[in-house]
Image (cartoon, rainbow, N blue to C red):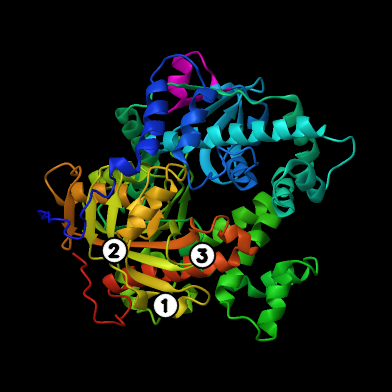
Amino acid sequence: MAVSRVALATHSEEPAGGRLSDEVELYQRTYSTLLRSSGETALRVLESSHRAMGSSLHPLAGSDEPDLGVFIYTIRRLPDAIAGADLVIMGQDAEVFARNGVRIDEWEEADAPARRRRWHDSGQGMHAVLLASASDVDDLIPTLVAFQIEWNKLRVRQRAAGWPPQQASSPEDCAQALGGAAEDWSRLREAWGERFDERLSLIAERRMNLRVRMLGGTQVGYARMTRRWWTPVHERLAGEGLTDRPMYLVSSNTHSLVNIATGVAREREASLVEFVETLPESDILREELAAFREGRTEGSWENFLYFVARLYFDSHGEEGRAARRRSEQESGVSHLPSKTALRVPAQIIPLAKLHPERLDSRLGDVDAEALAESEAVVVNIDYPLGLAAYNILREVAVDSAALRGVYVLGKAATLNADVGDVMLSSVVHDEHSGSTYWLDNAFAVDDLAGDLRFGSGLDNQRAVTVKSTFLQNRAYLDFYYREAFTVVEMEAGPYCNALYEIADADRHPVGEAVNFSKLPLDFGIIHYASDTPYTQARTLGARGLSYYGMDSTYASSLAILRRILRLEGALESASSRTLRPD
C-alpha cells in the first residue's frame, strides 16, 4: 500500500527548528565527533557544552548548588562500581572488544537498576558497555557527564565543609553542610544503601575524571546485532510451528500481558494475601490490603494481586521464579531472555493455547471455541530504547510476512497531564528523521477508561520522539507545547519509521509529513505519564507505591489484548470502531 504524504498545515515553523535547539545539537555533535577518535576522550571536555545546553532534566548543571535529583537519576542508570571507574569503553558486541584486545568475557558482569544495558567491570577501573543502537550513545554520554558534574560539585562542597565527618551522617546533616534537600539525601542514602558513608568518603578523596572510548558503532553492526537478538525468537516460533501464523507484535513490558493472560496470580490469591500479612505492619502493601478489606480504596484487586505476585515469587528465589514460569507455560507462554547487547526479553503467546477461564475477567466474555481455533501468535517484547525500536520492527517484519498488528505501550513525559495519566496520540513527530506521522490510532479513551481507577485517559494527543531524556531544554519544550505536542517519549518515531517501510516501497522519509490513515496492519500507540518536566521530580517513584503506576499500565494492556481478541473473533466488539484484521 502506498502511503500518501500531506502538508503539515498546522505548523508555521519546523518542529525541530535549529534556532531552538542549537545548544542541544552542538552538544550532540560535539560528543559524536569526539567518539570517532580511535583513542580515549576525557568527559571533562563535554562539561561546558552539557551546561550550556540548559537541559530541563539537569537544570542546576551550571550552578554550584548540587542537583541531587539528577545525581540519583544517573546513579540508577549506571552500574554501582562506576564510582571507582576511570575508563568506559563502548561497543556493539563482545567480538569487537576482543578484536581490540579487550576480553570482556573475562570481566565481571555489572548491571544498572533503571537501564537494561549490559556492563562488564574489569575490577581495575575499566568498564565496558554494550550498545544496542545509536540511541544508547545519546542516553549514556549525557548520563555520564551529569554524574561526573554532580560528583565533583559534591566534592567541592565537602572539602569546603571539612567533610565527611568521622561518624555516620544523617540526611539532615548532609543537607545542612552540603546543600540540597534532606528528602533528596534520604533518597540518595536509599540508592547507595550500606555504602552511603563509604561513598561520601570516596567523593571527598577522589575527583571524578572519566574517559570514554568508542569501538565500532556502525549501522550495519546494529542491524547484525538485532538479527542475533531475533534469531532465538524465530527458532522458537519455528520449533512450535508458528512461523507462518498471523502475528501481533506488542512492545510493552514482561509482566502485564502475561499476568492478564495466564491467571497465575489470581490462582494464588490466598497465598498472596497470606504473604502480604507476613510483611511488617508499616509496609504500604499491608495498608493497601487493609484498605481493600475496609472498602476504602479505589484500586483494582487484580492489579494488587499482580503487584504482590512479583514480590511473592521473588521472595522464593530462583525456585519461585521457576515455579511461575512453569505455570505460565501451561498457558503456552514461552519466555526468551536476550544474550545480546539488545537486552530486550521476548515472550511468545499462541492464542489457541490460552485458557479462557484463566483470562482476566476485565477482558470480557471470551468465545472459548473461537480462541481455540485462532492461529495467531502474540510476540511481546520489553520496550526498547530509541532507535532500537526501528531495528526490531524492521527485523520482525522482514522475517514475518503475516504481521497483523503492532501495538506500542511505553512511558512518556507529559506537558499537560499528570503522572499516571494515559495518553493516546494521533500525531507523532520524530526527531531522528524529522518526519511527522499522522495516525489513525487503534485506541481511543473508551477502550481503557473503564479500567482506569487513578489516572485519566487523553486521546487525540501529539507526541514528539526525542533523542534522549537529557537532550531537551526549556525553550525546546516550550516550542513543542505551543505547537500542541504534549507527549515527550523515545520510541514511537522509530516504530513509525519502520512501519513506513512495511507499507511503502521507499525507505522512511526525512523531514516530511506522512499520512498513516490507511495501513496494511493494525497500529496503536499508548503512553502513560511517568514524569512531568514542568514540575521536576514528579515521577511515579515519588508517589511511593508503584501500584499506582500499574493502574495505567494494566488498563492499557487490557485494551491491547482486548483489541487482539476482537480482531481474532474471540471477543465481541463493544464499540462501532472499525477493526482491520487483514
Q: Residue at x 42, y 36 (%)?
A: 138
Q: Circles 2 and 3: CB distance less than 8 Å? A: no
Q: Would you say residue 400 is visible in this rendering?
A: no
Q: Which mark is residue 419?
A: 3
The answer for how far apart the CA atoms under marks 3 and 1 are is: 16 Å
The answer for how far apart the CA atoms under marks 2 and 3 are is: 38 Å
Is disc 2 placed on a helix, strand or loop?
A: loop
Sequence-first tag of 2 and 3: 2
Sequence-first tag of 2 and 1: 2
Where in the figure is residue 550, as x and y percent of width and height? 53, 66
The C terminus lies in quadrant: bottom left
Q: Residue at x 35, y 32 (%)?
A: 222
Give the residue at mark 1. 449
Residue 171 in the image: above or below residue 323: above
Give the residue at mark 2. 375
Where in the figure is residue 29, as x and y percent of width and height? 36, 29
Q: Residue at x 76, y 71 (%)?
A: 277
Where in the figure is residue 422, as x and y percent of width and height? 43, 67
The span picked out in magenta is: 87-103
Instruction: Point out the residue furthest to the bottom here.
Output: 295
Q: Would you say residue 259 is visible in this rendering?
A: yes
